Image (tube, rainbow, N blue to C red):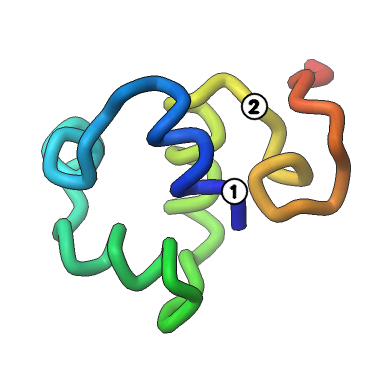
Protein backbone atom coordinates (compact mmCIF):
# COMPACT_ATOMS: atom_id res chain seq x y z
CA UNK A 1 0.00 0.00 0.00
CA UNK A 2 1.22 3.50 -0.83
CA UNK A 3 -0.15 5.01 2.36
CA UNK A 4 3.21 5.97 3.89
CA UNK A 5 4.42 7.44 0.60
CA UNK A 6 1.26 9.53 0.18
CA UNK A 7 1.27 10.66 3.78
CA UNK A 8 4.90 11.78 3.59
CA UNK A 9 4.39 13.53 0.23
CA UNK A 10 1.65 15.59 1.84
CA UNK A 11 3.70 16.26 4.97
CA UNK A 12 1.12 14.62 7.23
CA UNK A 13 2.02 12.72 10.39
CA UNK A 14 0.42 9.43 11.30
CA UNK A 15 -1.25 11.18 14.21
CA UNK A 16 -2.79 13.91 12.04
CA UNK A 17 -4.05 11.37 9.50
CA UNK A 18 -5.49 9.24 12.28
CA UNK A 19 -7.22 12.24 13.85
CA UNK A 20 -8.57 13.51 10.51
CA UNK A 21 -10.05 10.11 9.65
CA UNK A 22 -11.02 9.10 13.20
CA UNK A 23 -8.77 6.05 13.01
CA UNK A 24 -6.39 4.81 15.68
CA UNK A 25 -2.77 5.87 15.02
CA UNK A 26 -1.71 2.29 15.70
CA UNK A 27 -3.90 1.17 12.80
CA UNK A 28 -2.25 3.68 10.46
CA UNK A 29 1.17 2.37 11.50
CA UNK A 30 0.11 -1.22 10.92
CA UNK A 31 -1.37 -0.40 7.49
CA UNK A 32 1.95 1.19 6.53
CA UNK A 33 4.04 -1.77 7.69
CA UNK A 34 1.69 -4.36 6.21
CA UNK A 35 0.90 -5.89 9.61
CA UNK A 36 -2.77 -5.14 9.03
CA UNK A 37 -4.96 -4.65 5.97
CA UNK A 38 -7.49 -1.85 5.79
CA UNK A 39 -11.12 -2.83 5.30
CA UNK A 40 -13.05 -1.61 2.28
CA UNK A 41 -14.61 1.39 4.04
CA UNK A 42 -11.21 2.52 5.32
CA UNK A 43 -9.67 2.15 1.86
CA UNK A 44 -12.36 4.44 0.47
CA UNK A 45 -11.74 7.02 3.20
CA UNK A 46 -7.97 6.93 2.63
CA UNK A 47 -8.33 7.22 -1.16
CA UNK A 48 -10.78 10.10 -0.80
CA UNK A 49 -8.53 11.84 1.73
CA UNK A 50 -5.57 11.81 -0.69
CA UNK A 51 -7.76 12.19 -3.79
CA UNK A 52 -6.37 9.07 -5.44
CA UNK A 53 -7.96 5.88 -6.70
CA UNK A 54 -8.08 2.80 -4.52
CA UNK A 55 -6.11 0.98 -7.22
CA UNK A 56 -3.32 3.56 -6.87
CA UNK A 57 -3.41 3.29 -3.09
CA UNK A 58 -3.06 -0.52 -3.38
CA UNK A 59 -0.23 -0.37 -5.98
CA UNK A 60 -2.44 -1.80 -8.72
CA UNK A 61 -1.68 1.17 -11.00
CA UNK A 62 0.80 3.99 -11.21
CA UNK A 63 -1.93 6.42 -12.26
CA UNK A 64 -3.27 8.24 -9.19
CA UNK A 65 -6.26 9.69 -11.06
CA UNK A 66 -9.71 9.11 -9.70
CA UNK A 67 -12.04 8.27 -12.58
CA UNK A 68 -15.53 9.20 -11.52
Q: CA distance from mark 2 to mark 1?
A: 10 Å
Say which of 39 and 8 sits in front.
Answer: 8
At label 2, counting other C-alpha atoms closer than 10 Å, the crowd grade (few under 14, some 14-19, many 20 or more) is some
Q: Position of residue 18 (x, y in %)?
A: 19, 45
Which residue is at a point 22% across and 46% down the rendered structure image? 14
Position of the N terminus by quadrant: bottom right
Side (left or right) of 30 relative to 19: right
Q: Position of residue 66 (x, y in %)?
A: 75, 21
Say which of 41 and 49 sits in front.
Answer: 49
Residue 24: image quadrant is bottom left
Which residue is at a point 79% across and 16% down the rendered structure image? 68
Side (left or right) of 39 relative to 64: left
Q: Say how many tags the image has.
A: 2
Q: Nearer the viewer, mark 2 or mark 1?
A: 1
Q: Secondary structure at mark 2?
A: loop
Q: Would you name the residue on which mark 2 appears?
A: 52
Residue 11: image quadrant is top left
Q: Would you name the residue on which mark 1 appears?
A: 2
Which residue is at a point 21% across and 37% down the rendered structure image? 13
Which residue is at a point 71% across and 33% down the rendered structure image? 53
Say which of 22 and 10 sits in front.
Answer: 10
Chain-order first, disc 2 or disc 1:
1
At label 1, counting other C-alpha atoms closer than 10 Å, the crowd grade (few under 14, some 14-19, many 20 or more) is few
- Labels 2 and 1 touching (C-beta < 8 A): yes
Q: Which mark is residue 26?
A: none
Q: Secondary structure at mark 1?
A: loop
Amino acid sequence: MRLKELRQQHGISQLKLAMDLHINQNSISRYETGEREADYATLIRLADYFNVSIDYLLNRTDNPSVNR
